[in-house]
Image (cartoon, rainbow, N blue to C red):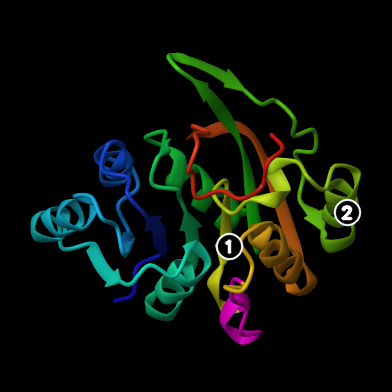
Amino acid sequence: MRPMVSIIVPIYNAEQYLRRCVDSILNQEYTDYELLLVNDGSTDASGDICEEYRDRDPRVIVIQKENTGVSDSRNRALDRARGKYLQFLDSDDWITPDATESLVRAAVEDDCDLVIADFYRVNGKHYVEKKHIKKKDVMSREEFAMEMADDPADYYYGVMWNKLYRRSIIEEHELRCDASMNWCEDFLFNLQFIRHGQRFRALQKPIYYYMKRKGSLVATESV
């Protein structure tokens, strides 16, 4: 049977943070998922750490590849993913124990194609909730696009890691990240997705710990 969620983590030289990220996923209260770890040609111990987790948990799938960038890493995982929904993390971040359950519950209860959630910005030992999401009800494509247009560079809309996507839309329309770009590729993917989605939902609940650091995989700069 296919899992409900495919969780995708692109990885590049993240040995210092990777265990925290993966442990936060494997310790989720929601368990019906597969975890795809994509090692993008890391030169540190990241690849070995991925293999270690694969040997310990049958839900873990490891893709070892040459260094071709975060977009190609996500695309490789999209080619392998089997879940009804897709969830993304960056390898230096982590999620709350109820993150996946919260996203899936909202998607299923309201039959949503995309669910977006609040997050914490991490600065050392300090966590600051972003508190930007205002709309709680289900939004149409037009309503969501208006929210996005009001603040297009905001991380709520520009990144992939605080969202849950219906995979059938991605596959039906052959959506992939643009591997030729090294900035705003997340934002462009989201623009493609909302063209085809019908129902959108925002959760006024922080589920993700975002740690911005030099060399992070995220290319968008505003937060």
Quadrant containing the N terminus in the rendered view: bottom left
Q: Which residues are magenta?
A: 169-177
**In this view of the protein, which residue sits in the foreground, 65 or 165?**
65
Is residue 112 at all visible to an observer of this figure? no
Residue 190 in percent (x, y) is at 70, 62
- Placement of 15 over or under 131, stated as above or below: below
Mark 1: which amino acid? Tyr
Residue 165's disc is: 1
**In this view of the protein, which residue sits in the foreground, 223 or 119?**
223
Query: Which quadrant holds residue 119?
Result: top right
Query: Which quadrant holds residue 131?
Result: top right
Packing grade of label 1 (10 A; few <14, some 14-19, many >=20) is: many
**In this view of the protein, which residue sits in the foreground, 172 or 67?**
67
Quadrant containing the C terminus in the rendered view: top right
- The residue that appears at 83% across and 49% down in the rendered structure is 148
Q: Disc 2 designates what residue?
A: 143
User: How far apart, in angstroms, are the residues tagged by discs 1 and 2?
Assistant: 17 Å
Q: Is residue 198 left or right of residue 68?
A: right
- The residue that appears at 50% across and 42% down in the rendered structure is 102
- The residue that appears at 57% across and 73% down in the rendered structure is 179
Residue 172 in percent (x, y) is at 62, 86
- The residue that appears at 47% across and 67% down in the rendered structure is 74
Is residue 103 at all visible to an observer of this figure? yes
Residue 132 in percent (x, y) is at 75, 30
Circle 2: element type: helix
Mark 2: which amino acid? Glu
